[in-house]
């Protein structure tokens, strides 16, 4: 009887092992059938995203985005009275990097400027490496391929982990790991997106924030690299009324800004040139004379900076970024905003910081308004001396 029991258990275990073997083989066969073969250069969706998302909000994808047909964003920060305030608005991470039809031309220009003016548009201290590396890693591993999958993809030559970011617009492969020198990493960033970046680190003495790294291919009237190692308050010393109106509140705001919060604002001026790289000339400082200058209506631009501010969660650095937008005067006219722009120029005299009228060179372009009959004669000549006229503005008539 005992031998019969043993034989029965032996038969049961034999049957059980056969079943296990059968179902294991079946599962393996199904997995092979269902799992597609990966091409040598796999797309981001087929790869493991190894980016660290701690402290970063989710990014909303734009799977059908077409950069070639997307017009640049329009910003019209026109107000009849200028008051010096922070003028900030809450934003989202999705707004941080905007793409448009100028993308390819802009990044080609940026790369050219970095080769021609490296000491003006690039600067860094080694202490900024942690912050630059953090932003670079997040931007390439997560933000760009998630937000704009039609333009950027994480790819690999083999395996299931991403090895590089493929720029589908330029057909380039970019390393996911930052360079040893933050200067080199900043240069890659400067040629990848149409935004300028300034990294401010907590000051070593515990008092405020200090600029430690930057890539600014489109400076607005001054050499940004000369501001390296300056505190926020010292960078703004030439700005009229900054010390009295903004210094303390700006320092407090920077100190309290939390990771995951994105802030935006707009800065504007009128330039007598259509050039994006202007390392001097867009501002007037105390003691300077108003220059004799000509303006070509077709070349003059309304220049707006779309500015963003946020704190990097791992390094604690504050990243100030901006995208420069240029609008023609005829464009403003066609939108019916000529009077609004003229009132904005005249409004620089008013408000709590009248020194901005001089600082923004309104003494130059403020002649954009006179009576229509005289202005039509001026426009026939296209070019005229700004300082030939004392009346407040050609814009009221022309726009």
Image (cartoon, rainbow, N blue to C red):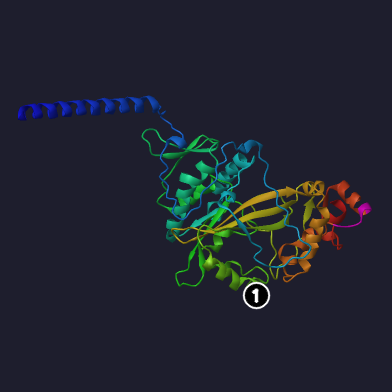
Q: Pointer 1: residues within 10 angstroms few (<14), some, or many (20+)?
A: few
- Tell me if I can see residue 289 in this picture: no
Q: Position of residue 348 (x, y in %)?
A: 76, 65
Label 1, on which residue?
A: 244
Left or right side of 60 for 4: left
Q: Looking at the image, which residue sits at the far front?
A: 1
Q: Looking at the image, which residue sits at the far bottom?
A: 244
Q: Position of residue 57 (x, y in %)?
A: 51, 52
Left or right side of 314 for 23: left
Q: Looking at the image, which residue sits at the far left?
A: 2
> What kind of element bears circle 1?
helix
Q: Position of residue 378 (x, y in %)?
A: 88, 51
What predominant SS class does the magenta segment belong to? loop
Is residue 279 a member of the stretch shown in magenta? no
- Quadrant position of residue 308: bottom right
Left or right side of 300 for 195: left
Q: Is residue 20 above or below residue 305?
A: above
Q: Which residues are magenta?
A: 369-373
- Quadrant position of residue 269: bottom right
Residue in the image at 65% along x and 75% along y: 244
Choose between 337 and 304: the one closer to the eye: 337
Residue in the image at 66% along x and 63% along y: 87
- Tell me if I can see residue 50 in this picture: yes
Q: Position of residue 48 (x, y in %)?
A: 40, 40
Q: Quadrant of the N terminus?
A: top left
Q: Is residue 124 above or below residue 207?
A: above
Residue in the image at 39% along x and 27% along y: 34
Looking at the image, how many numbered discs can be counted on the residues?
A: 1
Q: Is residue 112 above or below residue 36?
A: below
């Amino acid at each position: 009887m005992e031998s019969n029991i043993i034989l029965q258990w032996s038969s049961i275990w034999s049957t059980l092992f056969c079943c296990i073997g059968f179902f294991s083989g079946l599962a393996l066969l199904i997995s092979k059938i269902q799992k597609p073969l990966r091409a040598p250069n796999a797309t981001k969706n087929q790869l493991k995203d190894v980016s660290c998302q701690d402290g970063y909000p989710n990014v909303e994808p734009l799977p059908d985005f077409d950069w070639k047909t997307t017009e640049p964003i329009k910003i019209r920060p026109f107000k009849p009275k200028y008051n010096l305030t922070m003028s900030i608005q809450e934003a989202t991470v999705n707004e941080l990097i905007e793409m448009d039809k100028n993308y390819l031309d802009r990044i080609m220009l940026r790369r050219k400027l970095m080769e021609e003016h490296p000491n003006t548009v690039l600067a860094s201290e080694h202490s900024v490496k942690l912050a630059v590396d953090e932003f670079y890693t997040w931007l390439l591993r997560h933000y760009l391929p998630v937000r704009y999958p039609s333009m950027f993809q994480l790819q690999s030559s083999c395996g299931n982990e991403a090895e590089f970011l493929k720029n589908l617009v330029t057909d380039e492969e970019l390393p996911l790991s930052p360079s040893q020198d933050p200067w080199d990493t900043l240069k890659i960033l400067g040629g990848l997106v149409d935004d300028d970046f300034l990294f401010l680190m907590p000051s070593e003495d515990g008092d405020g924030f200090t600029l430690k790294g930057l890539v600014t291919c489109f400076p607005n009237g001054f050499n940004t690299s000369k501001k390296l190692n300056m505190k926020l308050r010292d960078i703004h010393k030439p700005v009229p009324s900054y010390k009295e109106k903004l210094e303390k509140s700006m320092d407090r705001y920077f100190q309290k800004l939390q990771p995951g919060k994105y802030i935006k604002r707009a800065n504007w001026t009128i330039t007598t040139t259509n050039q994006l790289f202007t390392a001097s000339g867009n501002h007037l400082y105390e003691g300077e004379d108003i220059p004799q200058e000509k303006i070509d209506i077709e070349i003059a631009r309304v220049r707006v900076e779309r500015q963003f501010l946020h704190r990097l969660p791992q390094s604690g650095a504050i990243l100030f970024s901006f995208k420069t937008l240029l609008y023609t005067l005829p464009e403003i006219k066609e939108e019916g905003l000529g009077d609004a722009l003229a009132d904005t120029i005249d409004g620089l005299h008013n408000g709590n910081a009248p020194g901005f009228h001089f600082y923004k060179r309104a003494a130059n372009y403020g002649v954009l308004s006179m009576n229509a009959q005289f202005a039509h004669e001026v426009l026939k000549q296209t070019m005229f001396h700004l300082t030939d006229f004392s009346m407040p503005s050609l814009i009221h008539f022309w726009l």
